[in-house]
Image (tube, rainbow, N blue to C red):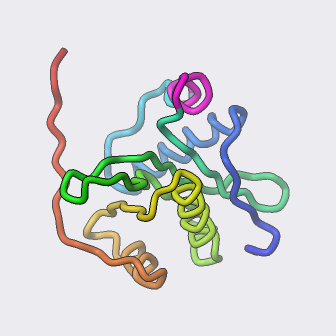
Amino acid sequence: MTAAARVRHAERSDLPRVAELAAQHAEYERAAPPATDLAERLAGVLFDAPERRLYCLVAEVPGGEVVGYATCSPELSTWECREYLHMDCLFLLPGHRGLGLGALLVEAVAVQARSLGLSEVQWQTPAWNEGAIRFYARLGALGSDKRRFTFEVSP
């Protein structure tokens, strides 16, 4: 399948599908669903903002169906005092996992990092997501145990 499948940068017309996939991703990770206007919000940061802060890549199978996505953005490490690319999301529909598309998405994120002059990609996955952890380890990624916290700030 991967020989005919491809990964490319998302186009504006892909965003409703990316929003659908993001909703399935949130459900899979036992998280709250994304905003109902996610496609419009993504359009704002991907295509309408004066400075690009987010990159979205999609996995497309023969026939044009988008079956997965990855998003990433540059971040700054205080300890290293250098930028890296943070992969915020990587998701494939269940029927398309294990076919090489995830590796294609990760490689496309690495290409994006190199194009920005960045030498590292970082990301996280839930500790219970053993399939993803095995996948990332097969790619040669190193993990570290940390917990993520969210602190809501009222306006």
Q: Is residue 47 left or right of residue 52?
A: right
Q: Nearer the viewer, residue 129 or 113?
A: 113
Asked whether 149 falls inside the magenta stretch, the response is: no
Q: Residue at x 59, y 61 (%)?
A: 111
Q: Residue at x 41, y 64 (%)?
A: 120
Q: Nearer the viewer, residue 141 or 33?
A: 141
Q: Is residue 113 left or right of residue 145?
A: right
Q: In what quadrant of the picture does the C terminus appear?
A: top left
The correct choice, above or below, for 46 with respect to 86 in the image is: above
Q: Horizontal and vertical percent for residue 114?
A: 55, 60
Tally of numbered tags: 0
Q: Nearer the viewer, residue 28 or 42?
A: 42
Q: Horizontal and vertical percent for residue 93?
A: 58, 60
The correct choice, above or below, for 149 with respect to 37 in the image is: below
Tell me where residue 61 sits by quadrant: bottom right
Q: Horizontal and vertical percent for residue 27?
A: 40, 50
Write the start and end of the magenta stretch as one range.
40-51
Q: Horizontal and vertical percent for residue 109?
A: 55, 59
Q: Is residue 72 left or right of residue 69?
A: left
Q: In what quadrant of the picture does the N terminus appear?
A: bottom right
Q: Residue furthest top?
A: 155
Q: Main secondary structure of the magenta part?
A: helix
Q: Is residue 25 left or right of residue 15?
A: left
The correct choice, above or below, for 34 with respect to 62 in the image is: above
Q: Residue furthest right?
A: 63
Asked whether 49 falls inside the magenta stretch, the response is: yes
Q: Residue at x 49, y 58 (%)?
A: 90
Q: Residue at x 54, y 66 (%)?
A: 106
The correct choice, above or below, for 1 with respect to 20 in the image is: below
